[in-house]
Amino acid sequence: MYENMAILAVFVLVYSLIAGRVDKMPLSGSMIYVAFGLLMGPVVLGALDFNIDTEGIRTLAELTLAFVLFTDAANANLGVLRKTYGLPVRLLLIGLPLTILAGFGVGLALFRDLTWFEVAILATMLAPTDAALGKAVVENEAVPGKIREGLNVESGLNDGICVPILFTFLALATESNAGGSTAGLAARLVAQEIGIGVAVGLGLTLIGGGLLKTCVERGWITDVWSRIPIVALSVSCFAVAQVFGGSGFIAAFSGGLFFGALWKQHKARFLEAAEGTGDTFALLTWVVFGAAVVGQAIGRLSLPVLGYAVLSLTLVRMVPVALSVVGLGLNMESKLFLGWFGPRGLASIVFAIIVVNANLAGGDTITAVVVWTITLSILAHGVSANPLSKAYGRMMSQS
């Protein structure tokens, strides 16, 4: 345990010292984290030996995603979002279902050993985009505001929307849908996940944000402790929503949006610590992913697995995105940019662990596809985020 602790602590220390330099390189932090985990893990050097089960990885990934969703939503430019809300609405209500449908079609063609419901599960697992891996684009001011806010809202909500869809397909695949129709089950799950998630996120943020404001005005909170409330609030939104059967992801994102609206110009002081906590948790999550997951997936690589991963990151997303934004006046460069920057990551890891615990017959194949898609996404989107964002920004400024 102490060897693992020492290695991780030194790595966090070293990376924190050079993070600003890394941001200017054609590499992303997540690429370095996963590579370090793979190098130090049992497949290569064997220095890191995590005695961590799937639930531990799931908890780590969920907490990381909760921090990222809350802070990204709180930092959203609501003025831009109000003027361009049609873009994320199209991406979520049209692009997301079409992406699942496209992934389903590709899966049927490539995996004859999976049932239809298992293919639908795979397509749903890889439909949501990752807010953490997308930060390099969302925070890059070279990219036009409406595109950044569109991608931010899409990544903040699509994982929560996919949760009830995934559970519906899981129920059908495991023949546990004995009571009620498929449509009824899906509608009930969607209403429960989204409704409870939004209610918890807004309610807790209203209470927590109000208390925070009162305590600040009365001088009851010190500078040191002012770094803690948002960390606690983001976890509270996530965990309370999960307890009541809602989507913790939607609760964290809706709570963050509401907090940003409540505090506006004064939010930076309180968000700084939560952003740092999220970045640290992301580092640990990706190191664990590289050490404990990627190494095991190397032996499961096959042409169908690789083919699905490549198509999932390209045509399966890019074509539905292009179709969903028809009529919004976007040029081809914007459509391609939106379609390409749909990285897969934390949400898909959480979904993969849920599927592993469901003991599906095709679970090993599904898990292998998800792991390789995430790994390729980390590489492809990590390398391309900064240069493509700058190139796209210049192109849009000249047009």
Image (tube, helix red, strand yellow):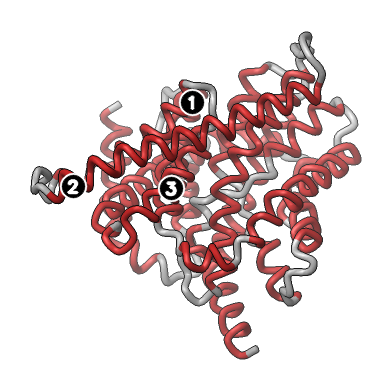
Residue drawn at the location 49% of the way across and 47% of the way down = 34
Give the image location of residue 310, x and y in percent. Answer: 75, 52
Which of disc 2 and disc 3 is earlier in sequence? 3
SS type, badge 1: helix
Secondary structure beneath label 2: helix
Q: Is residue 125 left or right of residue 362?
A: left
Amino acid type indicated by mark 1: Gln
Of callouts 1 and 3, the N-terminal one: 3
Q: How many marks?
A: 3
Q: Which residue is mark 3?
A: 68
**Which residue was labeled with disc 1?**
242
- Residue type at the position of mark 3: Val
Which circle marks residue 226 in the picture?
2
Q: Which of the two discs, 2 and 1, labels the residue nearer the N terminus?
A: 2
Q: Quadrant of the C terminus?
A: bottom right
Residue at 59 percent across and 80 percent down: it is 391
